[in-house]
Image (cartoon, rainbow, N blue to C red):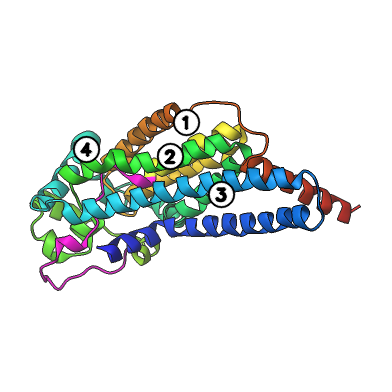
Amino acid sequence: MIAGIVKEAIISGVHILLVFLVFLFVYFAWKLVILFGDWLIWKHASAQTKVKALVKSLFNFILFFIVALSVLVFTIGWVNTNTNKTHLVQNNDYLMSVDKTIFDVYAPFWMQSLNNPLKPVFDFLSPWLVGTYSGLGVVLGIVFIIVLISNQKKFYQMFLALVLCGLFSLPFWYYFPALTPKEAYWANNSLLTQAPSDIKNVLTEYKPNDNLLDFLGQTNNDNKPVDLNSYIITTIPSMHVAWATLAVYFGIEVSRWLLLILGPYFILNFLATIFTLQHYAVDSFTGVLVAIVAILVAKLVIKSKKQSELNISAFIKDDINIFVKIIINLFK
């Protein structure tokens, strides 16, 4: 199960968030060394106050980060381990039928169906869609840094909302576990044999392009029974779409200009979760709804209040200003 969670994180690009964490760790370590030097060696009067302020902010930051992330990882691992998977196959078929009822097509397989007149468009967009899906970690990391630099309170709101998205999704995952369309219908022939005939017929028309095929990998045609306990069942709602929604919302909150980048990214990411067979269409829409609720709750929990002039955001802003001035002076 742990291997499945790690695999899903890598496919989604969420593991790249580690780069964000490493960057912050290196920055904070460097900043503390500089401030301690100012305080203990150069005897600057203001250095002691800055050291205390940074240590306090850093302690709260790390404690919040570790507790929130631990809760999220533990709960996802727990629900994948303890959920009753007796009706897993039926749930997969039900989500497919919901897509069919709402959109009149089996959305995950329609995009690359030979009968879809828009298939050439999706073929053209395929590298962008696959790249967008895999790049969630990069986008989240960049937005996290931008928000942290701009407003520490909004950063805490964003990270709390990210965790809340997972917590609010637990009832869905526990009482309605389901496999991704890829795992339910593409990756294993033994599961496909249990699917309704109309879904099997749709799959005969499904012809993914080479780029998407490289992402999906080859099908497993050995018809061997599969261990359902080895799969991730956190399909609905889509955390990929939920977290992308957070990135767009909080990114725009600190700078409306980011909409020019995050807007197209969100649209591509929304389509990509379905195009790559990682989610049913209904998963993606519910992902947006969960994100909206998480944002509202996070804003209520971490309410607006006057921030200390010496916080993490202020330290980073000062260092950026110093760095920019150095660069400008170099080119004078």
The residue tagged 3 is 142
- Identity of the amino acid at label 4? Asp
Label annotation for residue 302: 1
Residue 130, given in percent of the width and then of the height, sits at: 42, 56
Q: CA distance from mark 1 to mark 2?
A: 9 Å
The residue tagged 2 is 160
Sequence-first disc among 2 and 4? 4
- Do the numbered discs 1 and 2 sit on residues whose CB atoms are within 8 Å? yes
- Identity of the amino acid at label 2? Leu
Residue 161, given in percent of the width and then of the height, sits at: 41, 38
Name which residue lies at 38% across and 36% down. Answer: 291
Residue 187, given in percent of the width and then of the height, sits at: 22, 64
- Identity of the amino acid at label 3? Ile
- Identity of the amino acid at label 1? Ile
Secondary structure beneath disc 2? helix
**In the image, residue 37 lies in the stretch drawn in magenta:** no
Secondary structure beneath disc 1? loop
Q: CA distance from mark 2 to mark 4?
A: 37 Å
Q: CA distance from mark 1 to mark 4?
A: 42 Å
- Of tags 3 and 2, the one toward the viewer is 2
Q: CA distance from mark 4 to mark 3?
A: 37 Å
**Magenta span:** 216-240
Sequence-first disc among 1 and 4? 4
* Residue nearest the viewer, comparing 144 with 178: 144
In the rendered image, is residue 320 in sight? no
